[in-house]
């Protein structure tokens, strides 16, 4: 799996968009970008994933650059409940092994 | 629909004791995994299963055993607990290999302390 680089922490004001970057410059053509989050020691929660096109669901949007070397997870209107550690994972979709790094600790402030 | 249920939520063991962490899912998922999370660190894969009767090792399998006799259950056994196994353990399941299209569903965790 390709290695990812995320900032260790970020702050965001409540109600504003939270943009979480992820660098994956060694990504291979068959590797997807997955995002999970972990709220205060609960089990991780799947957010979204994509290969090369931008993706959107009810939780977030995922923007992947054209060269696929980086991506951004966007929470359009962050709330206090979005405070969590966000993990960007790059991997071949159907492999059994999924490796979590240190992630980005997002703090949403009132 | 309970999702992934882990028991117990908390456990304290003495060094050398054995125990089983229970994991059950009611979503008819074929794929199940066990992870551990040490303070301030990401999750590391211990063991996984692609279906009843089939298990394989992950990144940190030493000191742990698993079995998968049914689709629903995937227990994790600590053979002889050591302080290094103090951690939070998460069980996860997915409807397809690798959680490819819908992601993994995680349980709420078991917090284990070995003294």
Image: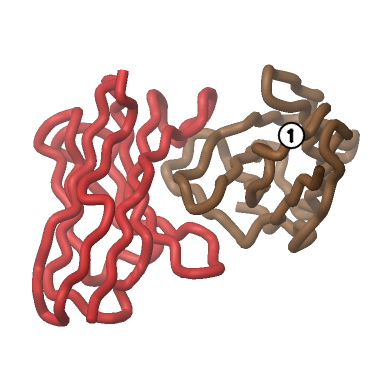
| Figure quadrant of the C terminus of chain B | bottom left
| Local SS, label 1 | loop
Residue B38 visible in this rendered orientation of the protein: yes
Please tell me how many numbered marks the rendered image carries: 1
Residue A69 visible in this rendered orientation of the protein: no
Most foreground residue, B95 or A78: A78
Q: Residue visible at 38% across and 54% down? A: B35
The chain coloured red in the image: B
Is residue B41 depicted above or below A56 in this figure? Answer: below
Q: Residue visible at 36% across and 34% down? A: B93
Tell me where residue A68 sits by quadrant: top right
Q: Chain of mark 1?
A: A
The chain coloured brown in the image: A
Q: Residue B98 appears at what percent x and percent y?
A: 45, 36
Q: Is residue A93 left or right of residue A84?
A: left
| Figure quadrant of the N terminus of chain B | top left
Is residue A4 depicted above or below B32 in this figure? Answer: below
Q: Residue visible at 36% across and 67% down? A: B87
Tell me where residue B58 sits by quadrant: bottom left
Q: Residue visible at 41% across and 39% down? A: B106
Q: Is residue A30 left or right of residue A98?
A: right
Tell me where residue A36 sits by quadrant: top right
Is residue A56 depicted above or below A35 in this figure? Answer: above
Q: Residue B71 appears at what percent x and percent y?
A: 19, 28
Q: Is residue B18 left or right of residue B84?
A: left
Q: Residue A100 appears at what percent x and percent y?
A: 55, 54
Colour theme? by chain
Most extreme residue toward the front is A110
Q: Residues within 10 Å of mark 1 (few under 14, many from 20)?
A: some
Is residue B110 depicted above or below B16 in this figure? Answer: above
Q: Which residue is mark 1?
A: A79
């Amino acid at each position: 799996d390709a290695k990812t680089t995320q900032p260790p922490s970020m702050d965001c004001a409540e109600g504003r968009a939270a943009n979480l970057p992820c660098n994956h410059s060694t990504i291979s053509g068959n590797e997807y970008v997955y995002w999970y989050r972990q709220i205060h020691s609960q089990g991780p929660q799947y957010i979204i994933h994509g290969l090369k096109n931008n993706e959107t669901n009810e939780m977030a949007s995922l923007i992947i650059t054209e060269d696929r070397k980086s991506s951004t997870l966007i929470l359009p209107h962050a709330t206090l409940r979005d405070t969590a550690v966000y993990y960007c994972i790059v991997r071949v979709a159907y492999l059994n092994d999924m490796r979590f790094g240190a992630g980005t600790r997002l703090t949403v402030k009132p | 629909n309970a999702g992934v249920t882990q028991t117990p939520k908390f456990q304290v063991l003495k060094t050398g004791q054995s125990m089983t962490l229970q994991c059950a899912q009611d979503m008819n998922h074929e794929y199940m995994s066990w992870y551990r999370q040490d303070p301030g660190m990401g999750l590391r894969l211990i063991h996984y299963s692609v279906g009843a009767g089939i298990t394989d090792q992950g990144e940190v399998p030493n000191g742990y055993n698993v079995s998968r006799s049914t689709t629903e259950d995937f227990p994790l056994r600590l053979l002889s607990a050591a302080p290094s196994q103090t951690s939070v353990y998460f069980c996860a399941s997915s409807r397809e290999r690798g959680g490819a299209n819908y992601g993994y569903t995680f349980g709420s965790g078991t917090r284990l302390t070995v003294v």
